[in-house]
Amino acid sequence: MSLTVLQYKTTQNRQPAPQADYLNQPSQDPSAKLMLYRTAKLIKDQIKHCKGMSLYPVSVNDIDLATAKQIVPTDVYLFLQWVITKDDVEADLESSCSIAADERRVLCLAQDLIHCASHGRVKLPKHVGLAMSVRHMTGSKQLVSILNRMGHCSSYDEIESVDTGLAKEILAKSQDCGTVIPSNISPGAFIQFAADNNDLNEETLDGKRMTHAMTLVVYQKKPFVPMPPPKVHADHVGKERSLIRINAYDEILECSAHGKRPNVKDFIGK
Protein backbone atom coordinates (compact mmCIF):
# COMPACT_ATOMS: atom_id res chain seq x y z
CA MET A 1 0.00 0.00 0.00
CA SER A 2 2.85 2.38 0.82
CA LEU A 3 4.52 1.61 -2.53
CA THR A 4 1.32 2.42 -4.39
CA VAL A 5 0.96 5.73 -2.58
CA LEU A 6 4.61 6.57 -3.32
CA GLN A 7 4.15 5.84 -7.03
CA TYR A 8 0.99 7.96 -7.13
CA LYS A 9 2.77 10.91 -5.48
CA THR A 10 5.72 10.62 -7.88
CA THR A 11 3.43 10.55 -10.89
CA GLN A 12 1.47 13.48 -9.55
CA ASN A 13 4.64 15.55 -9.06
CA ARG A 14 5.76 14.92 -12.64
CA GLN A 15 2.61 16.38 -14.13
CA PRO A 16 3.21 19.91 -15.53
CA ALA A 17 1.40 22.84 -14.06
CA PRO A 18 -1.59 24.15 -16.00
CA GLN A 19 0.22 27.41 -16.69
CA ALA A 20 3.31 25.63 -18.05
CA ASP A 21 1.15 23.42 -20.28
CA TYR A 22 -0.61 26.54 -21.60
CA LEU A 23 2.71 28.22 -22.39
CA ASN A 24 4.07 25.16 -24.18
CA GLN A 25 0.99 24.75 -26.36
CA PRO A 26 -0.63 28.16 -26.87
CA SER A 27 -2.05 27.27 -30.28
CA GLN A 28 -4.34 24.61 -28.77
CA ASP A 29 -6.51 27.30 -27.19
CA PRO A 30 -8.78 28.84 -29.86
CA SER A 31 -9.34 31.98 -27.83
CA ALA A 32 -5.59 32.56 -27.40
CA LYS A 33 -4.98 32.01 -31.10
CA LEU A 34 -7.75 34.44 -31.98
CA MET A 35 -6.29 36.99 -29.57
CA LEU A 36 -2.88 36.70 -31.23
CA TYR A 37 -4.46 37.10 -34.66
CA ARG A 38 -6.36 40.24 -33.62
CA THR A 39 -3.20 41.68 -32.04
CA ALA A 40 -1.24 41.08 -35.24
CA LYS A 41 -3.96 42.71 -37.34
CA LEU A 42 -4.07 45.70 -34.99
CA ILE A 43 -0.29 46.18 -35.23
CA LYS A 44 -0.35 45.75 -39.01
CA ASP A 45 -3.07 48.36 -39.31
CA GLN A 46 -0.93 50.78 -37.29
CA ILE A 47 2.04 50.12 -39.58
CA LYS A 48 -0.04 50.91 -42.68
CA HIS A 49 -0.46 54.48 -41.41
CA CYS A 50 3.27 54.91 -40.67
CA LYS A 51 4.80 57.48 -43.04
CA GLY A 52 8.47 57.14 -42.14
CA MET A 53 11.13 59.78 -42.80
CA SER A 54 12.10 61.89 -45.78
CA LEU A 55 15.28 60.90 -47.59
CA TYR A 56 15.86 63.93 -49.81
CA PRO A 57 17.83 65.42 -48.24
CA VAL A 58 18.71 63.47 -45.07
CA SER A 59 19.66 65.52 -42.02
CA VAL A 60 21.85 64.42 -39.14
CA ASN A 61 18.82 64.77 -36.85
CA ASP A 62 16.76 62.36 -38.97
CA ILE A 63 18.68 59.21 -37.97
CA ASP A 64 18.63 59.35 -34.17
CA LEU A 65 16.52 57.53 -31.59
CA ALA A 66 14.30 60.55 -30.91
CA THR A 67 13.18 60.65 -34.56
CA ALA A 68 12.67 56.88 -34.56
CA LYS A 69 10.41 57.10 -31.52
CA GLN A 70 8.28 59.73 -33.25
CA ILE A 71 7.88 57.50 -36.31
CA VAL A 72 7.11 54.20 -34.54
CA PRO A 73 3.35 53.76 -33.87
CA THR A 74 2.22 53.70 -30.26
CA ASP A 75 0.83 50.15 -30.29
CA VAL A 76 3.98 48.73 -31.87
CA TYR A 77 6.20 50.43 -29.31
CA LEU A 78 4.12 49.34 -26.31
CA PHE A 79 3.78 45.77 -27.56
CA LEU A 80 7.54 45.31 -27.95
CA GLN A 81 8.20 47.13 -24.69
CA TRP A 82 6.00 44.70 -22.76
CA VAL A 83 7.58 41.72 -24.56
CA ILE A 84 11.21 42.74 -23.96
CA THR A 85 11.09 44.58 -20.64
CA LYS A 86 9.42 44.04 -17.29
CA ASP A 87 7.60 47.36 -17.35
CA ASP A 88 4.02 47.37 -16.09
CA VAL A 89 0.85 48.13 -17.99
CA GLU A 90 0.98 51.81 -17.00
CA ALA A 91 3.77 52.47 -19.53
CA ASP A 92 3.01 54.79 -22.43
CA LEU A 93 4.77 56.26 -25.44
CA GLU A 94 5.76 59.41 -23.57
CA SER A 95 7.87 57.42 -21.12
CA SER A 96 10.94 55.40 -22.04
CA CYS A 97 12.11 51.99 -20.88
CA SER A 98 13.71 51.85 -17.47
CA ILE A 99 16.96 50.60 -19.07
CA ALA A 100 18.55 52.55 -21.92
CA ALA A 101 19.69 49.37 -23.69
CA ASP A 102 16.11 48.05 -23.69
CA GLU A 103 14.87 51.33 -25.16
CA ARG A 104 17.35 50.99 -28.01
CA ARG A 105 16.38 47.36 -28.64
CA VAL A 106 12.67 48.15 -28.62
CA LEU A 107 13.07 50.93 -31.18
CA CYS A 108 15.38 48.85 -33.38
CA LEU A 109 13.02 45.87 -33.40
CA ALA A 110 10.04 48.15 -34.03
CA GLN A 111 11.77 49.62 -37.08
CA ASP A 112 12.67 46.13 -38.34
CA LEU A 113 9.03 45.12 -38.01
CA ILE A 114 7.84 48.19 -39.93
CA HIS A 115 10.49 47.69 -42.61
CA CYS A 116 9.51 44.05 -43.19
CA ALA A 117 5.75 44.64 -43.02
CA SER A 118 5.95 47.51 -45.53
CA HIS A 119 8.44 45.65 -47.77
CA GLY A 120 10.94 48.48 -47.42
CA ARG A 121 8.58 51.20 -48.65
CA VAL A 122 8.65 53.04 -45.31
CA LYS A 123 12.04 54.69 -44.79
CA LEU A 124 13.32 54.48 -41.22
CA PRO A 125 16.26 56.05 -39.34
CA LYS A 126 17.82 52.74 -38.30
CA HIS A 127 17.92 51.25 -41.79
CA VAL A 128 19.22 54.41 -43.46
CA GLY A 129 21.78 55.14 -40.72
CA LEU A 130 23.07 51.57 -40.51
CA ALA A 131 23.49 51.27 -44.29
CA MET A 132 25.32 54.60 -44.47
CA SER A 133 27.59 53.66 -41.54
CA VAL A 134 28.49 50.23 -42.94
CA ARG A 135 29.14 51.67 -46.39
CA HIS A 136 31.32 54.43 -44.90
CA MET A 137 33.36 52.11 -42.64
CA THR A 138 33.79 49.16 -45.00
CA GLY A 139 32.88 50.35 -48.49
CA SER A 140 31.50 46.86 -49.12
CA LYS A 141 28.48 46.66 -51.37
CA GLN A 142 28.15 42.95 -50.63
CA LEU A 143 27.95 43.51 -46.86
CA VAL A 144 25.27 46.19 -47.24
CA SER A 145 23.32 43.90 -49.60
CA ILE A 146 23.47 41.00 -47.11
CA LEU A 147 22.17 43.19 -44.28
CA ASN A 148 19.44 44.50 -46.60
CA ARG A 149 18.27 41.00 -47.52
CA MET A 150 18.02 40.20 -43.81
CA GLY A 151 15.86 43.30 -43.27
CA HIS A 152 18.39 45.22 -41.19
CA CYS A 153 19.18 48.18 -43.46
CA SER A 154 18.33 49.93 -46.73
CA SER A 155 19.59 48.76 -50.10
CA TYR A 156 22.93 49.84 -51.55
CA ASP A 157 21.28 51.60 -54.49
CA GLU A 158 19.06 53.57 -52.13
CA ILE A 159 22.04 54.74 -50.08
CA GLU A 160 23.83 55.86 -53.23
CA SER A 161 20.73 57.88 -54.08
CA VAL A 162 20.75 59.40 -50.58
CA ASP A 163 24.43 60.38 -50.91
CA THR A 164 23.73 61.96 -54.30
CA GLY A 165 20.85 63.92 -52.79
CA LEU A 166 23.18 65.25 -50.08
CA ALA A 167 25.76 66.27 -52.68
CA LYS A 168 23.10 68.06 -54.75
CA GLU A 169 21.85 69.86 -51.65
CA ILE A 170 25.36 71.04 -50.71
CA LEU A 171 26.05 72.32 -54.24
CA ALA A 172 22.73 74.16 -54.37
CA LYS A 173 23.22 75.63 -50.89
CA SER A 174 26.73 76.82 -51.74
CA GLN A 175 25.30 78.65 -54.75
CA ASP A 176 22.60 80.37 -52.68
CA CYS A 177 24.81 81.26 -49.70
CA GLY A 178 28.11 81.78 -51.47
CA THR A 179 29.89 79.16 -49.36
CA VAL A 180 29.40 75.68 -47.94
CA ILE A 181 27.53 75.76 -44.61
CA PRO A 182 27.12 72.54 -42.58
CA SER A 183 23.56 71.37 -42.08
CA ASN A 184 23.83 71.50 -38.26
CA ILE A 185 24.90 75.18 -38.21
CA SER A 186 22.01 77.58 -37.69
CA PRO A 187 22.11 81.02 -39.35
CA GLY A 188 21.90 84.08 -37.13
CA ALA A 189 23.48 82.47 -34.03
CA PHE A 190 26.97 83.09 -32.65
CA ILE A 191 29.65 80.76 -34.01
CA GLN A 192 33.35 80.20 -33.30
CA PHE A 193 36.13 78.97 -35.56
CA ALA A 194 39.31 77.10 -34.69
CA ALA A 195 42.04 76.44 -37.24
CA ASP A 196 45.34 74.61 -37.11
CA ASN A 197 47.89 73.29 -39.57
CA ASN A 198 48.22 69.59 -40.34
CA ASP A 199 51.72 68.80 -41.61
CA LEU A 200 52.75 65.27 -42.62
CA ASN A 201 56.35 64.16 -43.22
CA GLU A 202 57.60 67.73 -43.03
CA GLU A 203 61.16 66.68 -42.11
CA THR A 204 62.15 64.71 -45.21
CA LEU A 205 65.72 65.14 -46.48
CA ASP A 206 64.82 66.17 -50.00
CA GLY A 207 61.86 68.31 -48.99
CA LYS A 208 59.48 66.34 -51.19
CA ARG A 209 56.47 64.11 -50.49
CA MET A 210 55.25 66.49 -47.83
CA THR A 211 51.65 67.45 -47.05
CA HIS A 212 50.74 70.85 -45.66
CA ALA A 213 47.05 71.24 -44.92
CA MET A 214 44.87 73.53 -42.85
CA THR A 215 41.97 72.19 -40.77
CA LEU A 216 39.08 74.46 -39.83
CA VAL A 217 36.46 73.58 -37.19
CA VAL A 218 33.20 75.44 -36.56
CA TYR A 219 31.60 75.54 -33.10
CA GLN A 220 28.08 76.67 -32.26
CA LYS A 221 26.09 76.22 -29.06
CA LYS A 222 22.74 74.57 -29.48
CA PRO A 223 19.99 77.19 -29.21
CA PHE A 224 17.30 76.80 -26.57
CA VAL A 225 14.52 77.85 -28.95
CA PRO A 226 12.91 75.35 -31.35
CA MET A 227 14.88 74.84 -34.52
CA PRO A 228 13.31 76.21 -37.71
CA PRO A 229 12.37 73.66 -40.35
CA PRO A 230 15.25 72.96 -42.75
CA LYS A 231 15.15 74.73 -46.08
CA VAL A 232 15.59 72.58 -49.16
CA HIS A 233 17.78 74.27 -51.78
CA ALA A 234 18.08 71.58 -54.48
CA ASP A 235 15.55 69.86 -56.72
CA HIS A 236 15.14 66.29 -55.49
CA VAL A 237 12.48 65.14 -57.93
CA GLY A 238 14.89 62.85 -59.73
CA LYS A 239 16.53 60.24 -57.51
CA GLU A 240 19.85 59.77 -59.30
CA ARG A 241 22.55 57.48 -57.96
CA SER A 242 25.33 59.82 -59.13
CA LEU A 243 25.79 63.43 -60.15
CA ILE A 244 25.15 63.85 -63.84
CA ARG A 245 27.12 67.07 -64.30
CA ILE A 246 28.82 69.42 -61.90
CA ASN A 247 28.24 73.15 -62.03
CA ALA A 248 30.31 75.36 -64.27
CA TYR A 249 32.20 77.05 -61.45
CA ASP A 250 33.32 73.65 -60.15
CA GLU A 251 34.95 72.58 -63.41
CA ILE A 252 38.74 72.30 -63.35
CA LEU A 253 40.37 74.13 -66.24
CA GLU A 254 43.05 72.32 -68.14
CA CYS A 255 46.51 73.76 -67.54
CA SER A 256 49.69 72.34 -69.08
CA ALA A 257 52.59 71.80 -66.68
CA HIS A 258 55.24 71.85 -69.42
CA GLY A 259 57.06 74.84 -70.80
CA LYS A 260 56.56 78.40 -69.66
CA ARG A 261 54.10 78.98 -66.84
CA PRO A 262 50.88 80.51 -68.24
CA ASN A 263 49.71 83.92 -67.16
CA VAL A 264 47.17 83.64 -64.34
CA LYS A 265 45.15 86.54 -65.75
CA ASP A 266 44.40 84.49 -68.85
CA PHE A 267 41.93 82.38 -66.83
CA ILE A 268 39.89 85.30 -65.47
CA GLY A 269 36.29 85.07 -66.57
CA LYS A 270 36.62 81.53 -67.92
Image (spheres, rainbow, N blue to C red):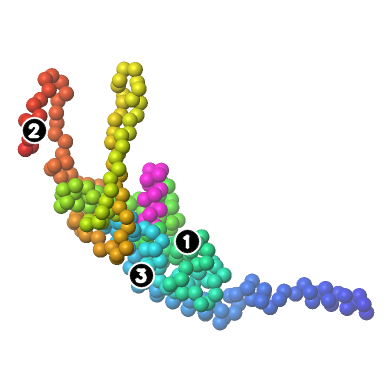
Query: Which residue, given by chain and number where applicable, does mark 3 sit on?
Result: 50
Number of numbered labels in the structure image: 3
Q: Residue type at mark 3?
A: Cys
Q: Is residue 262 visible?
A: yes
Cβ–Cβ below 8 Å for labels 2 and 1? no
Q: Earlier in the sequence, mark 2 or mark 1?
A: 1
To which residue does mark 2 refer? Answer: 267
Q: Quadrant of the N terminus?
A: bottom right
Q: Which residue is at 12% across, 23% downward?
A: 261
Report the mark closest to the observer, 1 or 3.
1
Q: Give the labeled residue for mark 1.
A: 104
Q: Which residues are magenta?
A: 127-140
Tag 1 secondary structure: helix
Give the residue at the far right of this rendering.
1
Other-residue count near label 2 (Cα within 10 Å), few / some / many at <14 / 14–19 / ≥20: few
The residue tagged with tag 3: helix, strand or loop? loop
Is 196 rendered above or below residue 152? Answer: above
